[in-house]
Image: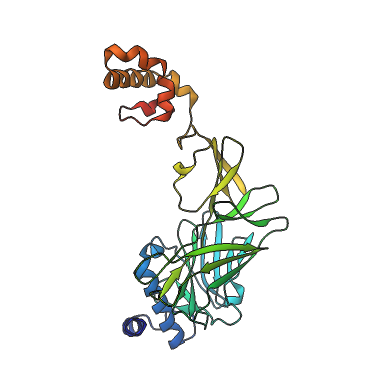
Amino acid sequence: MKKSRVLISTATLAGACIVGAGLTGFATQDAAEINAVDAVAAIQGVAPESFSSLAAVRSDSDTAAAATLPGGSVEVAVDPADGVSLGDSVHIGLPFAQQASDAADSQLPGVVAFDNKNGSTTVPVIHSDGTVQINTVIDNADAPKRYDYPIAIPEGASLQQDANGTVAVVTADGSPLRVFGEAWAKDAHGAAVPTHYEVRGNTLTQVVDFSEATAFPVVADPSTGVYSWNCILQNGSNYWLAPGSLLGNCKGSYLKKYINGKQVQSVPLTGYGKPANPAAFGTWECLVSLAWAGFSIYGPGKFVKFASGAFGYVLAQSIPTSITSCRG
């Protein structure tokens, strides 16, 4: 499978180079560029959404890809030892940076790859919404299973992992600077490969538990978004929503939104993942919807019985009779 994929990638690269020769700012490295094209092909094969809504980037002799996005700038350096900068507050180091090759052009605009020279390749991807994915493509069973991301963070901040496995960079006052999505990995057929995060000090490690029987290449991906959401539960505890999660998954009292550690929004909730608005219970829309629900579900004879528990029912059920008007 690897051999055939390399041959296809090489042919694609040859055609692309004829069209785009001289447009890249990187030194010509045939082997590195073939590896980069190969790695991108592996990601496209199992997670094509990784390359949707890519940010418009610029580059120079020291910067492989840079973008100015909502919430700040993102920069991927040409030298792997310089890693990925997320604004002025967070810097993510890349796995095996001391031995990896410089960034190589993948022929996909704005996407570069670092050959780790151990059977793995690192492919950072910048999205237009500020999400940054750092994909790892693992070629074979001889490649490492542990991928370390040392994270430089402001003084007083820390790297924390909650009970759900979500990892966040949190300031001294508890505000999130960055939240990392759930660890995932897929084999060449798109099947899930066991993986998880470990946190030691300020280093985030993704462990990918492949085996000799795994279909390679394997793609793994920690990602982080510019927006962070904190779900505050009724008992006062809280947890971070992973990037890309549905906000309705929060069944707490409040949902707080942060950008670069600053709270910019606090949304009260009903406890069922819906924005709360107590004033809505006094509106005519709410009263009409309650009456309609009562007659349609219980009939006129049971309306009185229904009315006594109507408000509790409104909060606990989702009825296709516009009863959500009572939630605001």
Choose top left, top right, bottom left or bottom right for residue 97: bottom right
Q: Is residue 328 visible?
A: no
The colour mode here is: rainbow
Q: Is residue 222 left or right of residue 214?
A: right
Horizontal and vertical percent position of residue 255: 53, 40
Closest to the observer, 256 or 291:
291
Q: Residue drawn 33% across and 29% down? A: 319
Q: Is residue 60 left or right of residue 48?
A: right
Horizontal and vertical percent position of residue 94: 57, 72
Closest to the observer, 58 or 317:
317
Q: Residue drawn 55% across and 81% down? A: 100
Q: Quadrant of the N terminus?
A: bottom left
Q: Is residue 300 above or below residue 144?
A: above
Q: Residue drawn 58% across and 82% down? A: 99
Horizontal and vertical percent position of residue 29: 46, 87
Horizontal and vertical percent position of residue 134: 50, 67
Closest to the observer, 258 or 326:
326
Q: Residue drawn 42% across and 29% down? A: 316
Choose top left, top right, bottom left or bottom right for residue 286: top left
